[in-house]
Image (cartoon, rainbow, N blue to C red):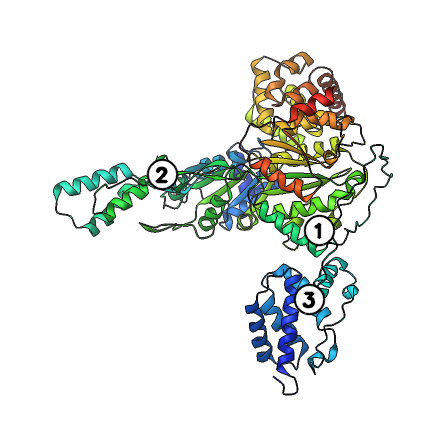
Amino acid sequence: MITAIPASVDDTLALLTRGHYVADRSLATALFLALKLKRPLFLEGEAGVGKTEIAKVLSATLGRKLLRLQCYEGLDASSAVYEWNYARQMMEIRLAEASGAQDRDSLTADLFSERFLVKRPLLQALEPDLAGPPVLLIDELDRTDEPFEAYLLEILSDYQVSIPEFGTVHAPEPPIVILTSNRTREIHDALKRRCFYHWVDYPSAVREREILSVKAPQADARLAAQVVGFVQTLRGLDLYKAPGVAETLDWAQALVELNQLELEPSVINDTLGTLLKYQDDIARIQGSEAARILTQVKTELAATTAR
Amino acid sequence: MTDDVPAGRLTLNLMHFARALRAAGLPVGPGKVLQAVEAVEAVGLSNRTDFYWALHAIFVNRHDQSELFDQAFHVFWRNPDILKKMMSLMLPKVRTEASPDRPEMAQRLAEALHGSGAEKEEPEKTEIELDASFTVSAAERLQDKDFEKMTGEEMTQAKRLLTRLALPLAEVTTRRYRADPMGPRVDPRATLRRMLRNGGDLSDLARKRRRTRPPPLVVLCDISGSMTRYSRMLLHFMHAVTNDRDRVHSFVFGTRLTNITRHLRHKDVDVALDAVSAAVADWSGGTRIGTALHAFNRTWARRVLGQGAVVLLITDGLDRDAGEGLAAEAERLHKSCRRLVWLNPLLRWEGFAPKSSGIRALLPHVDDFLAAHSLNSLADLAGVLSADGPRRSPGLRRWLKEAAG
């Protein structure tokens, strides 16, 4: 199934909804513009707010291939773009020698042909695809170092890669590029300039409840409301690492597995590890603080239902 | 060239002008003077603006030198007749208020034009009173702090320091490779190319080894009242380090934390420090080390400590909040960086005892405890940081014992 690029912001929202992704309008707008104007989309935000998910949903709903490049420090061209298959090349040389009749130039030309080229995600993304240009996800770009960023500049502005022995590979149609960053380092302005930028924020309470109902439908409505209220309150506190949407979903799923119909202080204490990942934070919330927040959340919920 | 101007005079004046610029810190060599003479001959002397831009094109090769050039030009070629007649060979008398809004730079220029040796900085001998009053006025002292004028002597010293700061950090292995005939790994790509050059014979293997690079550096500098005497010098130090390498982040704190990284990136130290003084609101107020570290841990730690940074914490440890909440924040900071080095200007002072609550809260969580009160101690820092030893320095034990005892 091949789907065309959405024609409006509403279409984009609908597309994301089809892929079970609850997005707010600002994100849909940024995404729509990126697709329409064929620019990379640069998504920055805290861990676990659903940045990577967008690329997956896009590839699934548009029926495109997903190419994922997970970044790490020291990522270089040989693991991101291409590599020659040296072992096979060596064999080729030996075979050529054995058969005897080979002049050097044609051997060289043959050695560096596509047969021996091992393609990595960035090069694959530039290749024509019957289903349409693939979705290229460059994940956690902030983990790489500056040299790789500089290298990306060339690819993202011209959608071409030059391989010295082989020539320049140029994409007939630019791929859909999604870059994500957790901001463990500021990305260079030159790279940001070539992209559309969107800061993916924590969702509002209403939207987070929507997300829960889509992603964890087996959770009881009352439980879901309490979970969201509790997490939203936690985000307002001065924690070292506030829980993301992924943590909310994990927690809701854990509570469902424990057959909870609503939150209780003892259960919160036992399952806090799915929500908070720093001992300092857990120590702060555990016990009386958790009970206090829970009471507050329940009172608020009661007030809204009574109205 | 107009006929009534003796060319020799002009050349001489241009030479003096170039000298003045060089003394003020612009990279002007003798070749530039010749070029300047040619340029002035080419544009003629009928128009002051042309004359200005001709010299600008020659002597300025970076945007941030423009400002200094501009001032020098207006001070030096002040005499309005100079372009008509070029009669006086007298160097212009320098008035330091050449540019009322930028006195610091004019000071540097004035010294350069006078050619006077700067007065030597006497090392401070006064002891710091430990009972300094830690009052922060309700409204912070939001003053636009004026740095003491910088002397040419200091400039050269700062530059000397800069060259000595070339490699102050023990290098960290990265995942990238560079060619190295004695390297531990075989480089198949280079080997194959070598084989092709030899017509398919495998003569010897090309090798490679991992590159190393210095880790990022994060400087947290205290600018409270008790540190006033040092903060200017330390800002120069931070400016030098920032312009010497990439991946340096600088913060200053008194009662609040300010990121001054971008301001310090300006190559000209005066412009950079001006920008800093405009950006920072709490000069010479009180200190809240705990609050500042908390703000850092919350807002910045993940963004600047991501690649195994070394942290320099510059403070005297005299905390207005008596070390409240400091230990926990220091511990968090310590656990999220490669190495935490504490520079304390009080350490130069014989008989220093780590007794104040702030100091005792910080000490258990640092890897190194060093003095930072003179250019020399900052230069020594380079040696300590580039040493490839254990993370915690052995000398720290003594301080911990003293603090406990």
Tag 3: residue type?
A: Asp
Please tell me in which quadrant of the rendered image residue A224 appears.
top right
Q: Quadrant of the N terminus of chain B?
A: bottom right
Crowding at dot 1, Cα within 10 Å, few <14 / some 14-19 / many 20+, comes out as many
Front in this rendered view, residue B184 or B308: B184
Front in this rendered view, residue B111 or A56: B111
Instruction: Identify which residue is drawn at 45% across, 35% down.
Output: A60
Q: Quadrant of the C terminus of chain B?
A: top right
Residue at the spot of label 1: B273
Q: Give the image location of residue B212, x and y in percent.
A: 47, 39
Tell us which disc is closer to us: 2 or 1: 2
Instruction: Identify which residue is drawn at 32% across, 43% down.
Output: B190
Tag 1: residue type?
A: Leu
Classify residue B279 as left or right of residue B60. right
> Mark 3 belongs to which subunit?
B
The secondary element bearing badge 3 is classed as helix
Classify residue B165 as left or right of residue A153. right
The secondary element bearing badge 1 is classed as helix
Residue B70 circle label: 3
Residue at the spot of label 2: B182
Tell us which disc is closer to us: 2 or 3: 2
Instruction: Identify which residue is drawn at 12% across, 44% down.
Output: A100
The secondary element bearing badge 2 is classed as loop
